[in-house]
Image (cartoon, rainbow, N blue to C red):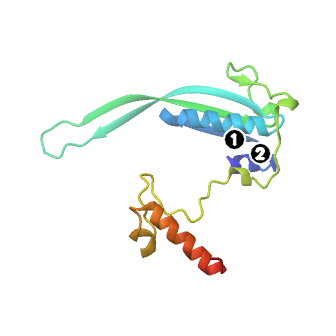
Amino acid sequence: MAYGARQLLEKKIGVIKLKASGQAISKVCYVADVLRRRIKGLHMQNVITNILIKDEYEPKEEGLDRVVIERTLTVFEVILALDESKIDKSHYGYQAPLADEEVKEFPLDFNAFSRRRGGQTGDRRGKQTGRYEETRKYSGDRDRRDRRRDERADRDTGRR
């Protein structure tokens, strides 16, 4: 999101195309909406297309036929541009820029979009996977681990 906004605002590129299929479609809609509400004068066009995908499988045994499976994949594409000449305004998926009072611009540092998680050592299930033996040793008892961490912090800062 930050990269695309930076490219648009610094005029390095004129058009951003976001494509998604399946469960990622909602994420593309979200990203496009956030950018639209943060960049003034951003034109948007939504396009829905289908792609035919053919999967061919070779048999492992001789004498068997090749299997070809055809399926249709729906693709959602969002085109974002600051210049209205880059977008077809007569297209049914065209959306004009939002009014200036609805847009809240942000500076180019883009720290608001940063998703870095410095120092996190847990995985999705809550199990500790840290590098240090001390973290792994008390992963089952979080209260004891937290208490020990606080004691270490107090000892290092000189508090009691």
Evaluate whether residue 12 shows in this view: yes
Circle 2 packing at 10 Å, graded few (<14), some (14-19), many (20+), is: some
Residue shown at the point (62%, 27%) measured from the top left? 47
Q: Are marks 1 and 2 in contact (CB under 8 Å)?
A: yes
> Please, what is the three-letter code of the amino acid marked with disc 1?
Ile
Q: Is residue 90 above or below residue 80?
A: above
Circle 2 — which element?
Answer: helix
Q: Which residue is mark 1?
A: 16
Indicate the quadrant where residue 78 lies: top right
In depth, the one of 70 and 77 nearer the eye is 77
Q: Position of residue 97 (x, y in %)?
A: 80, 29
Residue at 23%, 37% in the rendered image:
66
- Assign a secondary structure to mark 1: strand
Image quarter of residue 83? top right
Q: Is residue 150 above or below residue 143?
A: below
Disc 2 marks which residue?
A: 8
Q: Is residue 78 above or below residue 95?
A: below
> Residue lying farthest front?
160
For the point 65% across and 81% down, the residue is 158
Q: Is residue 78 above or below residue 135?
A: above
User: How far apart are labels 1 and 2 at the CA level?
Assistant: 8 Å
